[in-house]
Amino acid sequence: MKSFKEKLTQHQYDLRKTGIDILQVNVGKLCNLTCSHCHVEAGPSKVKENMDLRTAQAIVRLMDEFHPKTLDLTGGAPEMNPHFRYLVHQAHQRAIHIIDRCNLTILFEQGMQDLGDFLAQHQVEVIASLPCYTQDNVDQQRGRGVFGKSIEALQELNRLGYGQSNSGLVLNLVYNPVGAHLPPAQEKLQQDYKQRLSDDFGIVFNKLYTITNMPITRYAKFLKTFNQLESYCELLVNSFNPGTLDGLMCRNTLSIGWDGKLFDCDFNQMLGMGMRKDHELTVFDVTKKDLESWQVLTANHCFGCTAGTGSSCQGTLQ
Ligand code: SF4
Ligand code: SF4
């Protein structure tokens, strides 16, 4: 088997950053859920791994240094971080597009009663995980009762205008496979989701993104338990598609950890593959010049992004 680096060499592809269009900020591992596929290994007990104000303020400095088009907030459940709203305010003031990667059930947690209104007021795009339109599959992956709460949350977001045509409030959903296989075609699955969610629950949304599960951290352990880790990794390698390389999200994204460390993407972050020059790069001192023509740090998990039609935090690449 060729390594990912060898594949790049074979295709004479020099994987470098083209600029920083997206600041993707992982504000911490604190979450109200504990999903089996979670590559962040998030959960309710991860109270310490949570971004502090000093780091959030340094991110505001990066907004002014890099002038990104998008601030992409993820976690854990990003809304549980005490500085989530500060970051949203700051980005909104600078006319930066904001994404909240929301697990939906968070809308019903204590202290979150006004969350939907807050997101709508700041024109935050909501990208919400919903691994299936049926209860069994969602509850299997995300925990018992999650499907019902997710449906209620989507209905609430629709009431606020999210997903409705001409409202300007964008509601996108994310599908990731429950089993050890690649996601089906995004377009066709989107049609199925639209039909079923509308017929069964009166829900509307904008787009569905299909995302390949990364065989790292909690999901790797899950596959190992069922003796599927090796075959799943082989599937990713055998499905390598060079046509996905130009669209890889690491080319225009800067991923930031809860403690201010910098990474090429969220997956590298979870694997501790930090960006280094002669020292570790952090939000506290990085400059535009540091990242000019930056060569992306890769390893074999990268096959998860290049398999089939490709995968990124914005769905397929082709
Ligand atoms: S997948 Fe998302 S909702 Fe589930 S535990 Fe991880 S961060 Fe929380
Ligand atoms: S895992 Fe990260 S670094 Fe590797 S190809 Fe995907 S986005 Fe790029």
Image (cartoon, grey):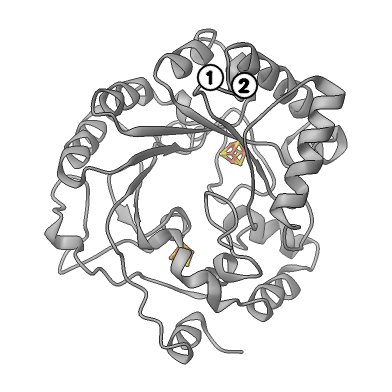
The crowding category of the residue bearing disc 1, from other C-alpha atoms within 10 Å (few below 14, some 14 to 19, many at least 20), is: few
Q: Would you identify the image quadrant in which residue 216 lies?
A: bottom right
Q: Where 66 falls versus 119 (above or below)?
A: below
> Which amino acid type is shown beneath numbered disc 2?
Gln
* SS label for mark 1: loop
Please tell me which residue is depicted at 38% across the width and 64% down the height of the picture.
Answer: 273
Q: Which residue in the protein does label 2 denote? A: 164
Q: Would you identify the image quadrant in which residue 28 lies?
A: top left
Please tell me which residue is depicted at 22% across the width and 60% down the height of the picture.
Answer: 280
Would residue 272 be seen by someone viewing this image from the given angle?
A: no
**Residue 264 pos. (x, y %):** 36, 60
Please tell me which residue is depicted at 55% across the width and 65% down the height of the picture.
Answer: 305
Mark seen at residue 167: 1
Name the image quarter holding the N terminus: bottom right
In the image as oriented, which residue stretches furthest toward the front? Answer: 166
> Which amino acid type is shown beneath numbered disc 1?
Ser
C-beta proximity under 8 Å, tags 2 and 1: yes
Q: Would you identify the image quadrant in which residue 259 lies?
A: top left
Q: Quadrant of ligand 1?
A: top right
